[in-house]
Structure formats: C-alpha cells, structure tokens
Amino acid sequence: MALLGLLILGGGLLYAGPMFMGVTSPVTLNIGYEPVQPVPFSHALHAGEMKMDCRYCHVSVDKWAHSTVPATKTCINCHSPMSPEGAPVLSAVHSESPKLQAVRDSWRTGESIKWVRIHRLPDFVYFNHSAHVNSGVSCVTCHDRVDKMEVVYQAKDQSMAWCIDCHRNPEPNLRPVEFVTKLGWTAADIDPEDEELGKFANDQAGLGAYLKEKNHLHPNVNCATCHR
Amino acid sequence: MKLPVTASEKQFFRSVDQLEGTPEFNEFLEREFPVAASEFPEGVSRRRWMQLMGASVAFAGASGCRYYREEFAGFVVPPSGRVAGLPQSFATNFVWAGKVVNGLVKSLDGRPIKVDGNAMHPMFATSANSGYADGKDEKFAQAGSDAATQAAVLSLYDPDRLGWLVQRDDRSLPAGKMVTVAESVAQKKGPVNWTDFDIAARSQLETLGGNGGEGLAIVYEPAPTPTFNRLLAEVAAKFPKATLVPYESVYGRNAVKGLESLGVSNVTVNHRLDKATVIVAIDADLFGSESASVINARQFSINRDPNGGNMNRLYCIESQFSTTGSAADFRYALQSSQMVAFLKRLEAAIDAGTPFEASAEELNYSKLSPSERLERVLQVIATDLLANKGKSLVTVGYQQDPAAHQIAMRINAKLENVGKTLFLLDAPNELAGLKSIKLDEFARQAANGQFNTAWIFAPNPVYTVAGDIDLPAALLAIKTVVYAADYDDETAVYSTWSLPLTHPLEAWSDVRSADGTYGVCQPMIEPVTGARSSIELLSILAGFEELDPAKIVSGTLQKLAGGSFTERLWQEALHDGFLKDSQYQVSSATINTAAEDLKPLPASAIAAEGENGSEPTVAKNEVLFSDPDNVDLSRLEVVVLPSDTVYDGRLANNGWMQECPQPITKLTWDNAALMSVSTARALGVGQSRATAEMVVIRQGDAMTKLPIFIVPGQAEGTIVVALGYGRSRAGSVGGVSGQFDVGHSIQGLRRWNQAFILNGIEVSGTTEPYKLATTQDHFAIEDQLGMGEIPRRAQVIVREGTLASYEKDHQFAKVSHHGLKIDSLWKEPEVRENHAWGMSIDLNKCSGCNACVIACQAENNVPIVGKEQVSRGREMHWLRIDRYFTADREATAAKGDSTNPVDPRIVTQPMACAHCETAPCEQVCPVAATVHTEDGINAMAYNRCVGTRYCANNCPYKVRRFNYFNYNQKYGYFYGWQDKRETANTKLQSLVLNPDVTVRGRGVMEKCTYCVQRVQNAKIMARNKGGVPIADGDVRTACQEACASQAIVFGDLNDKTSRVYANHNDPRSYAVLEELNIKPRTQYLARLRNVPVRLMTSEQLNPTWNHSHSEHGEEHHGDEHGHDHEEHAGEHEEAHS
C-alpha cells in the first residue's frame, strides 16, 4: 500500500515537474532562434554602420499591425542588377555579388523571396506594431539591438508575462516618437538645453512618466487587448 | 408585487410544443444542452458529419523541431496604397440570389472577406435616416444587406465549385463524382482546358455563322445587367436565326403582366415605402423574398420612430407567415388563391369612396367571428387607404396572379399614389424587338431535334424547372450543350461542355438598380477557379475582337453616358459604385383604370369556384376566408416559394445559409410542408418538435413526399413549401443523391403554368417519422426557475404595446420595474473607463431577416456544425434571433383550446451576449477566461478557457456556445495550435476567415464580443491619427452594419451625445431580465404595433400593464426611471442599495 502511494506520488511529481517548470514557464523557448535567411542580409551593416532607418524596409510598422518584410523592389533600389548590356541600372551596388543572387532571381522571375520569420506570436495574439511605435515604444524594446546583429535572432522573451510587465509599467520603455527607430538612443542623449525634455536628460523614469501623461498612454492589461 | 400574468395564461410562446409542454421542450428548458449532447455523432450521421468537417483528421505527432518555421513571402513590387493587414473597401454591384446588391466589399490583403451595402449608393442615400436632428446622420450612413449577400463570400471560396472544364461527349454514361476545385488542385489540371474549348467554339461558331445561327438556342436568366443584355442583342444580330430562351427559376413578370393589362409597358416599378404612411402588403414578403427587400426594410424602418411622430402602418394579408407578417402592425391570414377576390372587394370599397365608421356599440375584434373579421379588415383598410390618398401603397407579391397585380395597380392609381409612393420608370429594354420563346416551348422544340447547339447562361435549369417539363430529354437531343456552370450540378451532366463560371466577386459586369442607377460590377480577386465570366463567354459567341471584359463593360457605360464619357467618369463609377444621375426617368405612361379585367389564373379562379362548379365566387367578389374551425380540405393549396435561405437551390452548397435558421420556422438544413395547427389537425398529421410526420402531396399524377411543420398563424388550407432543397448534385454541403440528402425537392409537383400557387391538392399522412433540425426551442431564456416561470419571464423578455398605449403611457415598457427592488449582494464593481460600449436594438424596426446572424458568422469565423449537431442544440451562432409568438388571448381562451392560438403575431428579438456589467458568467469561471475589459466588454480569452461550461450554465440569456468538436478542422486548425492550413483541399475555404478574429478549437466557449476586434482597431486607428477621439459611429459592429432596418445601434454610453445613449434613455428602452441586476449593456426598444382601434384585440384595447400601474401609483415613474438611466449610462455613482 505504501509502495503504491509512493508510486502515485512519484508519478505525480514526474508529471508536475515538467508541467510547472517547462510548460507553464513564463519564459518562452524561442530566445536565440536564429534561422538562416535566403539572403545573408546584415542588419549590422545596413541599420548599424550605414544608419538606415528601420522604416526604409519595414514600411508599415508605423501604419498598422505588421512591420512587413521588404519587397524585392526595396532591395533593388540599391542593388539593381546589370542591364543585359552590362551597364548599371539605377544604382548598382554589388550588382554581381553572389550573396544577392536570391534578390536578383526574385526580381527577374517575379517570385517572392521567402524570408524566414523570427519573431512569431501565436495566432490568438493580436499585436499591432503601429500602436506601439506611435506611442513611443522603440523597436529595441522588443527586438533588442538589431543594428548590432549580423544575423538577426530573437533576443527578448516575448512571452505574455513579459508583455504585461511593460503594459503595467511602461515608463522605462517610453521615448519621444521621433527616436523610436534610433536603437541606441537613451535618455542620456537628451540635450539638457532642450526646452521641453531637457530636464529629463539621464532620467528615463522621469521622461517615461512625463510622456505617459502627455500622450495619454494607458496600456490595458485586459485579455481583449491582445486576444480577440 | 403581483405579476400581471398568471401562469395559466401564456402570453408569449416560442412553439406549439411550448404551449403543449411536450417532453422535448421541457428538456430544452431544463438542461442548457440536451441529454447526450456530448456524444460523438454516430452511424450514417457520423459519416455525414465527418464530411462536413472536412474529414482530413490527420493526427500527426508533435513535431520534433524546437522552433516553428514560418516563411514570409514578400512582394516583388508592392501594390501602391495597400498596408498589410489593413482592410480596403471597394464598391461593386451584382445580382445575387435574384436580388441586386449595391455592395461595399471588404478586401483584406487582396482577398474579399465581407460584403456589406454601399451607403453612398443612391438607393440608400436617398432614404437616409431621419429622426436624429443633430446632423450626425452622415457619420451613421450605413446601408445594410441581406443574409444571402453576407454569405456570398463563402460561395466564392467553396471548394466544390466547378474546378476545371468538363467535356461530356457521351452523356448517357453515369455522371460520376462531382468535379470540384479540390480535385483540380490535386490533379493539377483537367483533361481539357480553355484553349481546347476556344478551338471547339471557333469551329462551332463558323458552322453556325454560315447558316445564320440556325439551330442555336441561348438559354439565359433575365436580369437587369446592361452589358450582358447588350451582348445578347449583338449575338442575336450576328445569328438572326438563333433562338433566345429567357428562363427565370423564380418567375418575376406577373407584375409586368398586370401593368401591361392597364396599358403600361416598358416600365419598371419602384416603390418608395418611406413616402407611404399606410402600406398594404398583399401576399408580398416585402422584407424577405421580394427583390427589393433590403431597400424596403430600410425605407420602412425610417418611419418607425414613435417619438418623431412618424409611425407608418403596415397591413399584411398573406397565406404564409413571413418576416413581413411578423413586422406588420396588423396581419390577416388568407389563402393565396383568395387574394384576387380580396383585392376586388377592397377595390369596390375604395370605389364606393365612403369611409366606414365604427358604430358605438360594436364588438371589438377579439369577439368577432371569422366572417365578421374579414369584413372588419376590409372596412378598416379601405377607410385607412381613403384617408391617406397619395400617402399609401398597395403592393402585391411576385408570386401572385397577374390579375392581383392589375387590381392593386388600379387601386394605387385611384388612390393617387402613382408618382408619390410608387413610381413608374422608363426602363430601356436592350432586348426589345428580339423574339424569344419560353423554356417549355424550347423543351418541346429541342426534343423534336430543332436545335443542334445550346448555350446555357441560367443557373441549373434542370433542377429548378417545373416537373412537367422534361429538360434532360431536351438537352440530350441537342448535339452540343455549352453550360456556364457554378458547379458540376444537375444541368452539367446533361451538357457536353461545362465551363467554370466566375462568382460575381471575380467578374466584370454591370447592373441597374430598381431606380435605374447604373453600377459596375468589378472583380475583387482573380478567378480562383480559373473561371470565365458570362460576359467573356458571350463575347466569344458574339465573335468580338475585344475580349477584355473591363473594356466591354466600360463600352456600355460609354454608350450610356454618350458625349460626357471620360476615363474619369469610368473611374468615378468604379470608385463610388454607381454612375451619378443615371436613374431612370419617370414614365409619362398613365394607368388606364378602365381597362378590361384580367382573367385570374386557374389557382385563383378554380379555388374560388362554388361547391358544384357553379359561378366562380371571384366574380361575385366573395372571399373565402380561412376558418380554423372548418378547414375546407377541398380547397387545399400549395404555395411554393424560394427558400429564405438557399433561394432556388443555388445557395444549397453554402453552409452558412443551410444552417441559418429560417426566419419563422427556425428550421435548418431542411424544408418542410408548413401548415397551420388546424390544417394539420384536419389532415390528421402531426409533429412533435423535431419529429415530424412525412406527408404525400399529390396533384393529379404528380406527387412529392416531405415532412410537415406546424406554423401557428398560417392561412388554413395553405401549405407552404420552400424551393431549393433535395438537390441531387449540390456538393458536400447541399446534398448528393445516393450519399446524403438535404431537404426534399418540390420540383416534381410544380407545373409550368402554376409556378407558385398550386391547387387541386391532396395530402395524406404516412405516419413515417422524420427528424427535423429546428432551433426554435434552443437556448430558451425562460428556463431559470422552471416551467411556472415561463410566462412571467417571456412577458418581460419581449415587450410589445400598441402605438395608442404608448401615447397614453410612454413608460409602458418599464412595467417590470414597478415593485421590483433591486439590491446587490456585493459591492458594485467600480466603473472606470473612457468608453462604455453598449448596444440598443429596436424591436420596432427588426423584421427578423437574419442578415445580422450571417454577418456575425462571416465577421467572427463562426463555424457550421451540420444538421445532426444542430438537432442536439449545438449550433454556434453568436447572434440568434428569438422568435416569440403571441396571440389574441381572449379569443383563444373563448375557444378553450390553448394549443391552437387565434390570430398569432410574432415579435423577433435578436439575442447575443448583452455584456452585463455584473456578468454572471464571469463569477463562475474557475480560470478567469471570461473577464471584463475597462470599457465594459465581457471578453473571452479562448486560449485560457478549459471548457468547464459553468459560464454557459450561469448565463441568463443563453448566449454562450461551446465547441464540442473541432468544427474548424476543415480550415486546417487543430486544437488551435497545430496548423494545417496549407493542406490543399482546405486552403481555398480557409480564405473566408477573418484574420482579425481567433479561430477557435475544440473544447472552448465562445460568444459575442461586441466585435472587440473592431473596437480595438478603432482605438489604435485613433491613436495613429494623433490621438483623435473616437466619434459616435466610428465603431460599428458587423450586425449593425448588416441591418438594413437600422435597428441595431452600437456606441459609447459615456458619450452623452451618442445615439446609443439617446436610445437607452428612450422611454421604450428596457433591459431583458433587468431584475437580475446584471446590468446588461444591450437594451431593447419595445415593439409597438400601430393597430387601428377597430382591429385591436381586447388585450390591445386594455393592456394589462395599466392595471399594474394603478396598483403602484404614477408617482414612482419619474425618479425611479431617471435613476436607472443614469446608472446604465455609466454614471460614476454608487448603485442604490
């Protein structure tokens, strides 16, 4: 009888262990996901070194839910292939680089480039990029320093608990809307002479509280905010 | 407080079963889901169920990979102006199930997912809502549509559509499996393709061209489509010897014949219900099957606001019980074959011109005998019409005798209504002068071998044609039959070529609305089945050089606009959805009231003949009224009407329509022989809720067998049967003979010359039982405290008064408040939000047309569950329309037979989650899966729900739905996490899903969310625009948008200027079950019937609520109600304790 009791207890623990430690863990298992993309595009080069704005490629990030991957045409704007006569068309940066073969193929055939998705929320979560970007939440808050990544990977948790932490306490992650795509920006970059924000130089907490008040930001934590 | 009604007097009831208290109804009351509701479908039904669910149960193991790999396919060149995930709206116009749709299509990332009405279109814009003098009407400009239109997108993505070209050289071979898209995807391509057809067509046309089209027949469905008609005329010009065969399954030319008999031809009739104070509908289902139903509902509802002092009055004389009958102020049941006689009597009374006065001591309507009732009805209607010359309208249904139309039109002329409430418009006839033959003649000639080629542009004539025409034999006698087909259906198997035809959302075409406004039909998506439109096919037949359908349609516009045509005009017409100022001109034709009478059709004439074949009583102006005590079985008639859901069968494979509860019977997946209680008794046939007796209906040699269904209030001796069922090759939803059937076909009984009303009928019972799936007793609210509570509850759930009683006491709808002290056990939750979303539904405007039900289904990805599951009470509709009967209680009591109510009336009540402020469901959820949002929405977190169903048990409105099975499996969803959407045969259908709403898996609860996705998107949109406030009308729920009557208003109760706030403060506004202190955010405006005093029942003359008032005194009114309003409106004050 005692043995049976032990077995049941043991079995229970075997079940409960993974259930509580694994399945219900607030940390998702996706951190570090770093898939190989069809084009070895370097964010560190484009966004970091060359300081291209995120929105040059992710065009609808401030317009609606999706940030969208760039159309082939966006790449072609700079990396257009040689004309049949061998002369550059438009601006031809690295026209013949083998790394850009997939882009040229797509341009020639009209077939999409199949980018691999890195940050993925479940289907029952409705995240809207524009609601955050237009409220002064920077890309860096959820995607980390993409401008330093040679190959992009998921750096942040992106679990529900992690979302709610910020929805309950958004102040550390708020900045003036014009700096949302400046990934390296911090409150230290505020010009102390600035008429409106000068007093918040080096004071993220004060800046966050000020912006929250000024822009009427009341992030909700009810279920329907994200689950519809 | 003493309640005004005792348990023995049931004022409102749902079905005859409730009156009789049958075990089945009690079961539905006592258990929220009936017994065995969690059993898996068994036997044959299980197979059928699997078929409906998609049947691709692949229990693949959890994948071993750590990360889920998903690919993005970016654009190569992005389309300009499109933001991913943000819907775009495009205007278009098309003919759908016999009605012209002036639509606004919501297209998301390039695929159409919802069709609504186009509020800018002149048909809607000229009847904008009045009654709100605050100038906000612009914001509220909304159009409305009908259920079939809402379901159009599902047909577009139907995987059973004809997937490729089919050539059947030997039509004597077995037809085999239906050719569907799913198969064409699996097999990549068909044995023949368009190139093969083009080659075959060219050689065919060369032969025909050589002999002037000798032996060519073109069968087409007449429709107000200018380009199609223009091309048809071109074809006729090219092949002068060709034969045109117009054929419409639902014949609509009786009105034209009536007009022509009065010397008016080449006109179209446009009704303006908004201009009429008194409307008399004679067998006309104005808000249902009439072609202008949407605009009728819109125009009618404008004058249904008692506060604006503009309440119109609708009399409905009909044999069936229609939505119009339920919306009417006064309804009188009369057999369809008596309408000519009735109209003759009415005309005679109007000719006499003297209004009838009520004598001082006359009895009230409840106390009259059936014959006295008829006289009273005639007198009152004639008097009312005479008093409203130029402001009245007499309309007759399309199914009625041309003679009835003739008389009605004459009455309208005599009442000076022509040019005021009814317009005769000059409609150009593109086909004028072309000679054509009818389908019966075509069948005869074809059988004689007079044709060698036929092109068919009519949907499925082999199925829809009357039983006495052997169309298959006729088609088999034609060497080449080219059929433009939606499906590989009954007609396709008799055709040598079946060509996939575009859905209207894939095609270029054009349409003229009832007022003549020209509108282009523009494609929303490339043809998903590689189909061609009828315009493309006709231009091949016409031998055009130009085969681009867009250019052909713009050519029509060019002809119409003449010299003023510019590219800009064309673009404007596309953008707006109509060509400005293209309405037809008012005709100068006048009605010759002295013209000779039309001879009534056999049904109207023979049915009125005397016992011994003497003088027809029609001649003597004698109306044979419906007498429930003495049903004359020798005068039985069968009225065949297109189904309220599947029309003539062309929507049979549309699951949303099949499962849409028919407005009055609440039947799903079936048709039945509808008859009154007395008629069923006289015939000795019976029905007990879902189990009905099969009956055999005979007319001469023709017979058909189908189940009965009892509808209180239908005319005695009238049996109504819906068309469109019993399809033998509809598809995996609508029926395939030999595998499964959906309903019963009535075509065998129909006669070519008796399209709608059949007489000389014999009916015999078979004692054979048949299971029907009706939702009428499902989710009955009245169950809370047992049977004894029903009448009390029902009394307060739907509240109805007369206009007279309202004028006497504006607060009548508040009756249940008196004496009810509402205390809360808890501290009331604090209301602390910017918005307080609420809804108001005006029962005075609702006709129960089902548009909102299907709109909700389309918007919120609500699955269908199949007949088997519906009969277990598992339908998933978030929004249902409760239909309550009420009757003349005094007259019923006088007869002493409470199961055969006298003079039943209907109140319809759309019922969905009311978003209670103190929601009972939230209190009992063990995992907090249903919780309140800050703005007062009772939200459902599906991924948190564990399926205990406590919430549904605790919901007083019975609006929660449970996913017993994975109903969305066909879309590739499996328990919400395993994604199989790329599986080929589900890919097409899953395009219909709204990506803004979660697709639910098995084992979770769901319910109306107030379209929370629209609310959230509006908030985000407002922020993106720089924090502009959300204005009243910015958030519209799907049901609200679909409601042509504008009965549903949604908005912010914290905004004191909002419409919903105004409505909640209307004296007619009441909350259902408000005594539970759950503070529902959805309130209803009580139904008012504008009944003339002489037609009022005893109860309407002396409403019971007046008694309760006198008990409590009038002084309670002001403060008590005032307090309530403030509270409902979200004032931040402590609730009274």
Image (spheres, helix red, strand yellow):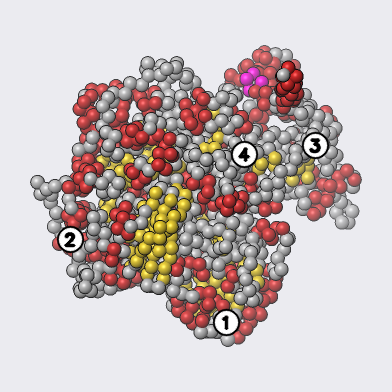
Decide: few, some or many residues near mark 2? Use Cα within 10 Å; few <14, some 14-19, many ≥20.
Answer: some
Which one is in front, B517 or B98?
B98
Amino acid marked by disc 4: Gly
- Residue designated by label 1: B452
Mark 4 crowd level (few <14, some 14–19, many ≥20, 10 Å Cα): many
Question: Under tag 4, what secondary structure?
Answer: loop
Distance, label 3 to label 4, CA atoms, is 23 Å
- Same chain for mark 3 and mark 2? The answer is yes
Q: Please state the horizontal and vertical placement of residue B133, each as a whole percent of the image.
A: 35, 38
State the residue at coordinates (63%, 79%). Answer: B204
Question: Which element type, helix, strand or loop, lies under badge 2?
Answer: helix
Return the residue nearer the eye: B297 or B855.
B855
The numbered disc on residue B1001 is 4
Q: Chain of mark 4?
A: B
Q: Give the extent of the magenta segment.
A: A165-169
B515 in magenta: no
Residue at mark 3 to residue at mark 2: CA–CA distance? 84 Å
Identify the mark nearer the N-term, 3 or 4. Answer: 3
Q: Mark 3 against mark 2, which lies toward the viewer?
A: 3
Tag 1 or tag 2, which sits nearer the N-term? Answer: 2
The answer to the question of whether label 3 and label 1 lie on touching residues, with beta carbons closer than 8 A, is no
Q: For the residue labelled by badge 1, is the local secondary structure a helix, a strand or a loop? A: loop
Where's the N terminus of chain B, which quadrant? top left
Residue B332: image location, x then y, percent:
27, 53
Q: Which mark is residue B349?
A: 2
Relative horizontal placement of residue B724, taking residue A201 as reference (left or right): left
Q: Main secondary structure of the magenta part?
A: helix
Q: Are marks 2 and 1 on the same chain?
A: yes
Where the C terminus of chain B falls, by quadrant? top left
| Mark pair 2, 4: CA separation | 63 Å
